[in-house]
Amino acid sequence: MQDIEPYYNWREYYNSSEDERSPFHGIVYSEFEYANTVYNYYIHPQWDTFGSSTLYIKILFADYEKGIAILEFIGEWNDALYNDVMFLKRDVIEAFIGNRINKFILIGENVLNFHGSDDCYYEEWFQDVEEGWIAALNFRPHVSREMERFNIDSYIVFGGELDDINWRTYHPADLLNKVESVINHRISNPM
């Protein structure tokens, strides 16, 4: 796990440690000091901590004019024991919502497990984005199934074409357009 770095090819477009509105503004990263772990395995020091002991994040991109934030995750999403969504909502998401971000792309290919609890914070997050949305890309099938079991799919759009987007090949603005077109298609063509 220590070799899994957050995606870094968009650093020329955005760097959360240089963004004064980011909750991670001013952080200085080490390439050599490994401190955070998932399942007793060290993770790369470029991942950010937000209060969870099992889930870590990297803000890959934020555009305040377009109202978009792209977040990558690694670890275990555990609402049952650690209330990860509460820390995520309070310590990261609210900072962005306060700066008019209302579209969130969550990249979850490195989320190993999900342990749910209630859906209150997801519902609150969904209500806070008003005209926006929350989309999950490339979450593992067993993680998506667990999220569905806890009704998270009522608030976060995932599955289908969103599980097959090769997001690393996109410019951030093009990824936003792609995800938005998938969401708009679902809204205009409900099952």
Image (cartoon, grey):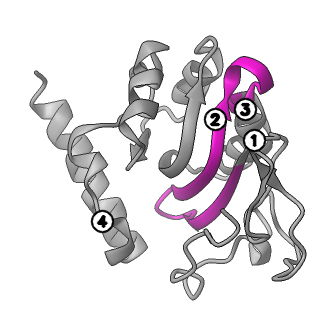
Residue appearing at x 36%, y 36% in the figure: 141
Q: Position of residue 166 (x, y in %)?
A: 30, 65
If you read the primary sequence from the N terminus, does the residue marked by circle 3 or circle 2 appear first?
A: 2
Asked if residue 45 lies left or right of residue 105, the reply is: right
* Element at label 2: strand
Alpha carbon distance from label 4 to label 3: 26 Å
In magenta, the rendered stretch is 56-85
Asked if residue 5 lies left or right of residue 48, the reply is: left
Alpha carbon distance from label 4 to label 2: 22 Å
Q: The residue under label 1 is which amino acid type?
A: Thr
Asked if residue 113 lies left or right of residue 121, the reply is: left
* Element at label 1: loop
Asked if residue 163 lies left or right of residue 103, the reply is: left
Crowding around mark 3 (Cα neighbors within 10 Å: few <14, some 14 to 19, many 20+) is: many
* Element at label 4: loop
Which residue is identified by label 2? 77
Which residue is identified by label 4? 166
Q: The residue under label 3 is which amino acid type?
A: Asp
The answer to whether mark 3 and mark 2 are in CB contact below 8 A is yes
Query: In the rendered view of the protein, which quadrant contains the N terminus?
Result: bottom right
